[in-house]
Image (cartoon, helix red, strand yellow):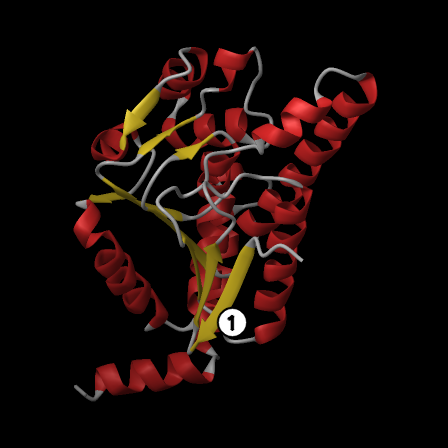
Amino acid sequence: MEQTVSLSIEGGVATATLCRPPVNAINEAWVDRLNEVLDEVAQAGQIGVLRIRSSGRAFCAGADLALMRSIFDSAAGRERMIALTRRMQEVFARMEALPQVTLAEIGGAAMGGGFELALACDLRIVSDTARIGLPEARLGLLPAAGGTQRMTRICGEAVARRLILGAELVAGADAVGLGLAQWSAPAAELEARAQALTARLAELPPQTLAANKHCIEVAARGGEDGFEAELAASAQLLAAPETQRRVTAFLEGK
C-alpha cells in the first residue's frame, strides 16, 4: 500500500509527516490516511500538539493532477471529485476541531488543497521561500475544501478577495503580513524554529491548551456565551491536579 502520511508520537507531541512524493498530491487514499492519523492522535491520550510537516520539498501542492486528468471529463468522474472534496471538508473540519493545538510547518509549496489543510491548523509557520495560495480560479474552479470560508475568516474579506479571486500565489516572506501565517523563517532555519515552537507548546498542559483553544473558537465563531465559556473552563482548570501543582509552585516561588 502506498504510504501517504506517517505519524510519530514522542512525549506530548504527535508529528504527522506528508510523504507522498513528489509533491504530496491529494487523492482518496491520502485523505483516508490523514483521517486515520487523527484517529491515532485521539486514541493516544495526553497529546497536546499535532505538528504537520512534509518529508519533501513541497508541503502539499494540492489535488492529484493524474486523478483529475483521468476523471474530470465525465459525469461520474465529476461526482467522484465532489465526493473527494466533501471528504476533505469533513477531515479538515475534524482536524480543526481537535482539542490539540495544530501546527503546520510549511517548508515548500502549499497550494489549493494543501494550503486548505494548513488553514485548518491553529498555527502556521512558513519558509520565506515557499509559495502559498489558493489558485484554483486559474482552472475555472474554486477552493472548495473550506478554502473560501477559512481564508475569509482568518485573513479577512479583503485578503481573501485578493488572493482567491486573483488566483494569486504569494511568497512565504509575505505570509505573515497578509495574515496567512503567524511566523515566517528562512528556509534553513524553518525546521529548528518549528521544533522550538512545538517544544514550547508541549510544555503546557494538554487540558489547558484545549480549554484556551475552545474559548478562542467560541469568540471566533459565536454560538455560545464566550464569557461563560471562560468561567466554565476556568472552573475545570482550577480543580485540575496539574494546575494545582503549577499554581502552588508559582506561589511558593519555585
Please name the residue shown 70% across and 25% down the image.
70
Q: Quadrant of the C terminus?
A: bottom left
Could you say which is closer to the camera, residue 37 or residue 152? Answer: 37
> Does 129 appear above or below 190?
above
For residue 145, side relative to residue 216 (left or right)? right
Above or below: residue 32 compared with residue 251: above
The answer to whether residue 65 is left or right of residue 210 is right
Residue 66 drawn at (x, y percent): 61, 30
Residue sitting at x 56%, y 32%: 63
| Residue 63 vertical position relative to residue 165 in the rendered view, above or below | below
From the viewer's side, name the closer residue of 128 and 66: 66
Q: Residue at x 56, y 51 (%)?
A: 95
Residue 44 at least partly seen = yes
Q: Return the residue at label 1.
A: 236
Q: Residues within 10 Å of mark 1 (few under 14, many from 20)?
A: few
Please name the amino acid that badge 1 sits on. Answer: Gln
Q: Position of residue 203 (x, y in %)?
A: 32, 73
Write down the quadrant of residue 248 in the picture: bottom left
The reply to whether residue 230 is visible in this rendering is no
Q: In the shown orientation, is residue 89 left or right of residue 143?
A: right
What residue is drawn where x is 67% and y is 58%? 1
Residue 163 locus on image (x, y percent): 38, 18
Q: Where is residue 38, by image quadrant?
A: bottom right
